[in-house]
Amino acid sequence: MASSSSSSSVSSTQEKQKPDWAGDDFLSKVVDAAISNKVLYELVMKPMARRTLINTAEKNGVAWRDIAAALEADPSLEARFAAVENQAVKYPEYYLRPFHAYAEGNMCWLAAFEAEPATYSMALRVYPKDRITADDAQGRLRDSYTSALRAHVIAHGDGANEPKVIVDVGCGVGISSRYISDAFPAAELIGLDLSPYMLAVAAHRDEEQPGAERRTWVHGKGEDTGMADGSVDVVSMAFIIHECPEHATRALMMEAARILKPGGTFVMTDNNPKSAVIQNLPPALFTLMKSTEPHSNEYYTIDVEGMLRECGFEHVHTEDTDPRHRTVLGSRGAEQYAAL
């Protein structure tokens, strides 16, 4: 395993590198065996995961079903879908697997309609003891990410210039994209996603929002963006890598290295394997979570910092940006860029 140099703004690095319920540990294998039982998964785990997510969200003030119903009733979304869809896109096999308790994964309207309330509910879970609104929780979560990105750009980027082009890979319905765009108002932001359903909702939500003229929604693959070499200042991946097999994660990093300018910044945020909160989730919760995330074992055992270095990044470091999540950053090296 490649060595890593990590700093923490929330808590010291945990001794355990990952939760026992992920990887090759005995507990992980027991959970995986239960999930692999198709009858148990379809009749018990999947519906239970959905009920838990929805009920928890609505209990905390997120109107999950109302938000989804309002989007479903909006006749403009079909036109937005047609406008954004690139029918030449070839979907990787892993993306077409069931996940997040949807048989079609992100390739359906229901996943797109429910992405926003699911994301707000996730933010509230980060701060369970704080009496804050879903909007405040989302803002705190995203601000910690953009602040880490800003600090890295100042420390290791071109200090004389603000980023001009930012690509948000796996942008979903655009929540992360808008926060990043607001934090870097001089930049053009490209929200890239494999799901035209998600992108249709992103474009819909962005209509008449401040800064919308600086944001573009593109249907495409993060592993093969079609963008020019060295044309981008920042590549962001927010809550994406846990949804990918290891080979796709490496391909995403290699593509980021290709399109970034020398000195450009790669940034990702996702669940922190070393987080005490993640490691100590109750059995019912981690079982339900793994049942909807087919690549959990790979994600929690990947050495993200080491992989970034292998892909040509330097100044690689990790920030524990909240009690559940880490943000990993690196800069595209000029020498490695020339050799890529």
Image (tube, rainbow, N blue to C red):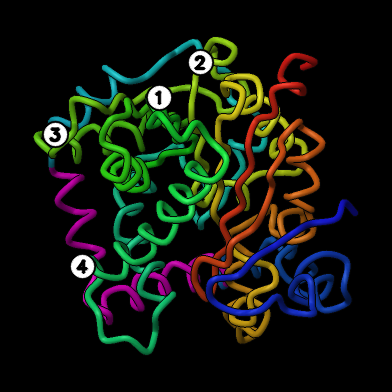
Closer to viewer: mark 3 or mark 2: 2
Mark 2 near mark 1, Cβ–Cβ under 8 Å?
yes
* Nearer-N-terminus badge (1/4): 4
Quarter occupied by the N terminus: bottom right
- Residue type at mark 4 is Ala
**Residue drawn 29% across and 48% down?**
113
Q: Classify mark 2: helix, strand or loop.
A: loop
Residue found at the far bottom of this picture: 129
Residue found at the far left of this picture: 208
> Residue 37, located in which quarter of the rendered image?
bottom right
* Nearer-N-terminus badge (3/2): 3
Label 1: few (<14), some (14–19) or many (≥20) C-alpha neighbours in 10 Å: some
User: Up-down: is 218 above or below 280?
Assistant: above
297, 107: nearer the viewer: 297
Q: Which mark is residue 207?
A: 3
Query: Secondary structure of the magenta portion, mostly?
Result: helix
Q: Classify mark 1: helix, strand or loop.
A: strand
Quarter occupied by the C terminus: top right
